[in-house]
Image (cartoon, rainbow, N blue to C red):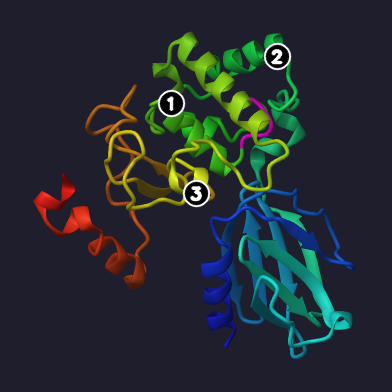
Amino acid sequence: MLHRTAAALRTALVGRAMLRFDAPRLIGPRPAPSRVIERVECHGKHLEIVWDDGLVLHSHLRLSGSWHLYRLGERWRRAMTHMRVVIEVTDWVAVCFDAPVVETYREYDRFRHPGFGRLGPDLCTAPDDQLQECARRIADYPDPQATIAEVLLDQHVACGVGNVFRSEVLWACELSPFATVESLAPIDCLHVVNAAARMLRANLHNGHRVTVASAPGGLAVYGRNGHRCARCGTPVQVRRVGEYARALYWCPGCQTRHQPAVGQAVDSADPVMDPHPAAAQYLADLPWRKSPLAAG
């Protein structure tokens, strides 16, 4: 039963920016407004919701708890007094009732350890000289073989870039997410940092994230696996990369700057699309995948 509930929550919540969060007796930090929900997982009676900044909401339902999913404005089937968590996104409201345990914690991230040094500047507020310092931190990164996609999530380089914006920033710069930092010129590093700062500041007070106004949903690649790229028309791809298998979206057609040579790219055995049968059927039904003529 809980697996069906998790599947419904996954369909309604994943890939959407959170508009409202309420948890009167929550233990732990609260997710920030407009953060995007990335995963919904269940294990036994445990259900976890994970945001793009690594914050995890853990609910242990035991015998009394349950999660409900409602259309926006729909009447709840349980009384407000039984509510433990409310998560609202566009069109949907997820409500947890009577769960004995509701808590949040952050996924383990070795780069947050004090031994790795002080955190980098916050790109939402950093002045120009600090933005240049962030660019230097990328250029002088301790592991020159690290990919730019990995480095953008390192809080010791810069703070503020979550999983959504790293995909969008790299698309805006036409930069391969698998480019190693040693392959980048100093001007490339500065372009990436400036693009990230512009996007973060433009969305600082928006509930719905927009990086490309002309793209459906306002995002160029994030959450758009199989859809045409807004710039070149190539289908967007997704791959889980890094130590924590975070979803990375990119366009292989136009994000080719500093693309690693054949044989150095990410392992081709990794899945490049959602393996769920429903996702496979959806992609197979796309017009440009049905026939060569449909691709235009």
Q: Which residues are magenta?
A: 157-161
Relative to 159, is 289 on the left or the right? left
**Amino acid on which disc 1 is placed:** Gln
Residue occupying the point 37% across, 30% down: 176
Q: Are marks 2 and 3 in contact (CB under 8 Å)?
A: no
In x, y percent, where is residue 105? 75, 56
Q: Are marks 3 and 1 in contact (CB under 8 Å)?
A: no
Residue 37 visible? The answer is yes
Mark 3 or 1: the one toward you: 3
- Label 2 crowding class (10 Å Cα cut-off): few <14, some 14-19, many 20+? some
- Label 3 crowding class (10 Å Cα cut-off): few <14, some 14-19, many 20+? some
In x, y percent, where is residue 192? 52, 22
**Amino acid on which disc 2 is placed:** Gln
Judging by the rendered image, the residue that carries numbered circle 2 is 130
Secondary structure category for the residue under label 1: loop
**Quarter of the image containing the C terminus?**
top left
Mark 1 or 2: the one toward you: 2
Residue occupying the point 56% across, 43% down: 163
